[in-house]
Amino acid sequence: MKSRWMIVSLPLFAAACAGSHAEQVRDARMERVEAQEDSQKELVEERGAQRKEALDQQYKAREEGVEAQDTPGTEQSAKLLELSKERSDYQSAKRTQLDKLAVRINAAQQKLSVLGERAPTKLRGELQSALTEHQTLQTEMGALSQVRSTNWEQETKRLNERLSGLESRVDTLDDNIEDAAD
């Protein structure tokens, strides 16, 4: 009787172990993707900080040059320079935000690869939508330097809303991938 039970249970036990091992491998790969994502986001933040520092130095030198002129148009030049600095700072900050989103989207893509056949088709569609939106926002960021002063506030408001929407979309995608992995 014991031998029959052992014969029947042995294949079940072997299958359970194999399934468990596959889950462990998948979990390890997911953790590796998440660690890479964290590392890449830190790099993006460092590059953003370096870009900001370079902009600050550049504009400080320009400000000193304008102040040294001491001509009738100096005050107007200083105002224009300040406006230019505000725009550059905004674009730099949004570039960093967009780059971090690119890292998160790439990580989501890798996680879907790890899931393989277990990844619902719906998630692949969500990923594609996020990729398309990200590409569109990159194009709009590139065109931001050409926006007239009269439209600047309207364009930045629209860009902020779209970036926020993409961030929400990527958050949802991450949550759905986690659910699919469980």
Image: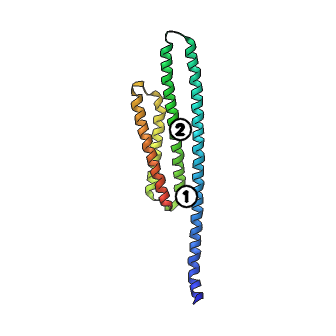
Q: Position of residue 132 (x, y in %)?
A: 45, 44
Q: Residue at x 56, y 77 (%)?
A: 12
User: Which residue type carries mark 1?
Assistant: Val
Q: In the shown orientation, is residue 75 left or right of residue 50?
A: left
Quadrant of the snapshot with the N terminus: bottom right
Which badge, 2 or 1, comes first in the chain's sequence?
2
Q: Which residue is mark 2?
A: 96
Q: Closer to the camera, 54 or 12?
A: 54
Mark 2 lies on a secondary structure that is helix
| Label drawn at residue 134 | none
Answer few, some or many: residues within 10 Å of disc 1's Cα (few below 14, many 20 plus, some between 14 and 19).
some
Q: Position of residue 100 (x, y in %)?
A: 53, 43
Answer few, some or many: residues within 10 Å of disc 2's Cα (few below 14, many 20 plus, some between 14 and 19).
many
* In the image, residue 73 above or below residue 178: above
Mark 1 lies on a secondary structure that is helix
Q: What is the basis of the colouring in this image?
A: rainbow
